[in-house]
Amino acid sequence: MIRVNQIWKHPIYQEQLQALQMLEEDRKFCRHTPEHFLDVARLAYIHALESHASASKELIYCTALLHDIGRAEQYRSGIPHDEAGAQIAEQILRDLSFDCLLYTSDAADEA
């Protein structure tokens, strides 16, 4: 799962993950640690297998790694984490040239 590892090692991803862990270090429940992201990936993959979804394991894991990456921005600036996360994920995916994982409204309009 090369793309998963590339996302994991990306400097922006690591910066956001470290900021999130620092911001949540006193939080007792549901901290957004690497274990959380991997738990989400595993549960999503099991669900995909059981429902015969056509998403690849790699796509599921990439998505799970990125799904809450905007939480630190939410804590810092109040931007909803889904909006901040979409911007962060787009930047990471573009940096890595993962255009096949990007979904934009322009692509939807062309379909």
Image (cartoon, grey):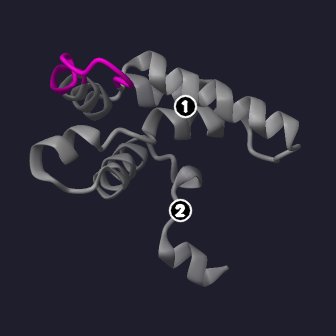
Q: Are marks 1 and 2 in contact (CB under 8 Å)?
A: no
Q: What label does residue 103 carry, if any?
A: 2
Q: How many marks?
A: 2
Q: What label does residue 34 carry, if any?
A: none
For residue 107, side relative to residue 7 (left or right): right
Seen in the picture, residue 7 relative to 35 is either above or below; the reply is: below
Q: Residue furthest bottom?
A: 109
* Relative image position of residue 89 (x, y in whole percent): 38, 47
Q: Locate the C terminus by quadrant.
A: bottom right
Q: Is residue 30 magenta?
A: yes
Snapshot quadrant of residue 2: top right
Which numbered disc, 1 or 2, marks the residue that appears first in the sequence?
A: 1
| Residue type for callout 2 | Tyr
Snapshot quadrant of residue 9: top left
| Residue type for callout 1 | Arg
For residue 60, side relative to residue 25 (left or right): right
Q: Is residue 83 magenta?
A: no
Q: Which residues are magenta?
A: 21-31
* Relative image position of residue 105 (x, y in whole percent): 49, 75
Q: Locate the N terminus by quadrant.
A: top right
Give the residue drawn at x 45%, y 42%: 67
Q: Main secondary structure of the magenta part?
A: loop
* Relative image position of residue 26 (x, y in whole percent): 18, 17
Q: Residues within 10 Å of mark 2 (few under 14, many from 20)?
A: few
Quick one: SS at disc 1?
helix
Which residue is tagged 1? 3
